[in-house]
């Protein structure tokens, strides 16, 4: 079983829809949770970053973390064709210099999202 | 400020050939890493470095070597290419001074095919 599971989709929605992307994980040491967006033939770029449980909102994007259920979500409101990309969840156990988890990200498989006009 | 750059963008090798994937960053980041991305597998960490002269293995290090002689450069070497190393390779860097964030900056990737 992978440490991080993510439904690869593909997911196709009409413009303006609310999109929900999810990941589950098994490692209780994960404390930092991220969502990366990757356009076709490009490198991933950080979209949202959350520490521990809770919600974080940035414009049309909301990230949720439920550590008790080991479940994280990314919601996209009023989705746009420009949101069409692969969305990768990523997690880390810590970022302190010298820590065993320093800088090591564990990624989900990525979900391919298409928003059609 | 070019960020993270990778060369080449595409490469085709024959089984048994060797090559070096280049990665450079101009953000003075101490931490650099290499990932490979395969369909259905997400990104997996190959090797990483926390500073010049210091490297360590990630999740899938076999068949790859790295060295870090300068802060800017972190090349990845394939000693004897195998078809299983056909993948897209991403280099990333992050600022080690920011303890509570993990913004890793990724390069554009190198698409490698091993025949």
Image (spheres, rainbow, N blue to C red):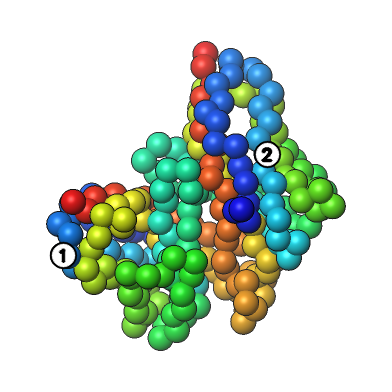
- Labelled pair 2, 1 in contact (Cβ < 8 Å): no
Residue at which label 1 appears: B17
x 48%, y 58%: residue: B44
The chain carrying label 2 is: A
> Which secondary structure lies at badge 2?
strand
Q: Where residue A42 is drawn, which disc sits there?
A: none
x 34%, y 66%: residue: B24
Residue B63: % across, % down = 32, 69
Question: Is A33 on the left or on the right of B30, as rendered?
Answer: right
Asked if badges 2 and 1 are on one and the same chain, I answer: no
Q: Is residue B11 visible?
A: no
x 34%, y 79%: residue: B67
Q: Splitting the image into 4 quarters, where does residue A79 fall? A: top right
Q: Where residue A22 is drawn, which disc sits there?
A: 2
x 56%, y 53%: residue: A107
Residue that lies at the very extreme toward the front in this rendered image: A1
């Amino acid at each position: 079983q992978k440490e991080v599971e993510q439904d690869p989709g593909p997911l196709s929605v009409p413009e303006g829809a609310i999109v929900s992307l999810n990941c589950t994980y098994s490692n209780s040491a994960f404390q930092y949770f991220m969502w990366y967006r990757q356009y076709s033939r490009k490198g991933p770029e950080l979209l949202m970053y959350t520490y521990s449980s809770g919600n974080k909102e940035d414009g049309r994007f909301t990230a949720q973390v439920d550590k008790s259920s080991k479940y994280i979500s990314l919601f996209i409101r009023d989705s746009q064709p420009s949101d069409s990309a692969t969305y990768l969840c990523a997690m880390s156990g810590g970022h302190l210099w010298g820590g065993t988890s320093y800088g090591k990200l564990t990624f989900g498989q990525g979900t391919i999202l298409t928003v059609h006009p | 400020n070019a960020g993270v750059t990778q060369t080449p963008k595409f490469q085709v090798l024959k089984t048994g050939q060797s090559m070096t994937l280049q990665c450079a960053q101009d953000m003075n980041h101490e931490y650099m890493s290499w990932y490979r991305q395969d369909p259905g597998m997400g990104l997996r960490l190959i090797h990483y470095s926390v500073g010049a002269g210091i490297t360590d293995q990630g999740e899938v290090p076999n068949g790859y070597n790295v060295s870090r002689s300068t802060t800017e450069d972190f090349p990845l070497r394939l000693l004897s290419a195998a078809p299983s190393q056909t993948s897209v390779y991403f280099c990333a860097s992050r600022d080690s001074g920011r303890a509570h964030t993990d913004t890793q900056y990724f390069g554009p990737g190198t698409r490698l095919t091993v025949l």
